[in-house]
């Protein structure tokens, strides 16, 4: 069974490292890659790191990318544009909270769901009421 890959993009490597640890406990088989911090391990994001992370978990099932703050979105969009040149096109940027969205995505991907189903649960995570 293949799984939709998950990429976690953050300005902080430590933040996505901890989140990956949590998500891997849900299902250790779902491929999860990190792109946290700049190329110099500073606070920020890197289109190159994001591109490499997507490639590392990409399959015919596709990839969903989660990000924390605005400029992470810009670098993610740049990475996806570059990957299209390599015919890596089944990549979706989730419009969902980083933790809740990635959590629901890992659960759904772990069920062997399609990219479309994983995208749909991440949309539901956006409207999740906590209290």
Image: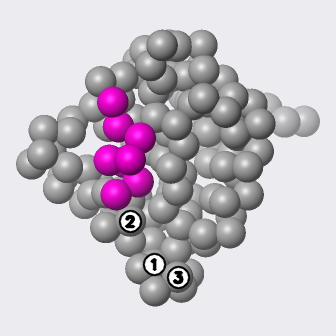
Write the start and end of the magenta stretch as one range. 52-59
- What residue is disc 1 on? 38
Q: Quarter of the image holding residue 47?
A: bottom left
Q: Quarter of the image holding residue 49?
A: bottom left
Residue 94, visible in the rendered structure: no
Residue 109, horizontal then vertical, whole percent: 55, 22
| Label 2 crowd bin: few (<14), some (14–19), many (20+), radius 10 Å | many
Mark 2 or mark 1: whose residue is earlier in sequence: 1
Residue at left 43%, top 15%?
114
Q: Is 50 drawn above or below residue 33 in the view shown?
A: below
- Residue 100 numbered tag: none
Q: Gap between marks 1 and 3, in whole Å?
A: 5 Å
Q: Residue furthest right?
A: 131
Q: Residue furthest left?
A: 85
Quadrant in which the C terminus is drawn: top right
Q: Gap between marks 2 and 1, in whole Å?
A: 8 Å
Q: Secondary structure at mark 1?
A: loop
- What residue is disc 3 on? 41
Residue at left 68%, top 69%?
14
Q: Gap between marks 3 and 2, in whole Å?
A: 11 Å
Mark 3 or mark 2: whose residue is earlier in sequence: 3
Q: Is residue 13 left or right of residue 63?
A: right
- What residue is disc 2 on? 49
Q: Is residue 7 left or right of residue 62?
A: right
| Label 3 crowd bin: few (<14), some (14–19), many (20+), radius 10 Å | few
Residue 9, horizontal then vertical, whole percent: 51, 58
The reply to whether dot 2 and dot 1 touch (C-beta < 8 Å) is: yes
| Label 1 crowd bin: few (<14), some (14–19), many (20+), radius 10 Å | some
């Amino acid at each position: 069974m293949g799984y939709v890959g998950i990429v976690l993009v953050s300005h902080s490597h430590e933040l996505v490292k901890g989140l990956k640890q949590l998500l891997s406990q849900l299902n250790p088989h779902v491929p999860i890659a990190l792109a946290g911090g700049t190329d110099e391990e500073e606070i920020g994001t890197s289109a190159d790191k994001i591109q490499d992370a997507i490639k590392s978990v990409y399959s015919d099932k596709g990839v969903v990318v989660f990000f924390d703050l605005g400029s992470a979105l810009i670098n993610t969009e740049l990475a996806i544009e570059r990957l299209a040149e390599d015919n890596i096109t089944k990549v979706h940027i989730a419009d969902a909270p980083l933790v809740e969205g990635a959590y629901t995505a890992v659960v759904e991907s772990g069920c062997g769901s399609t990219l479309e189903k994983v995208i749909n649960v991440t949309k539901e995570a956006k409207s999740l009421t906590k209290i």
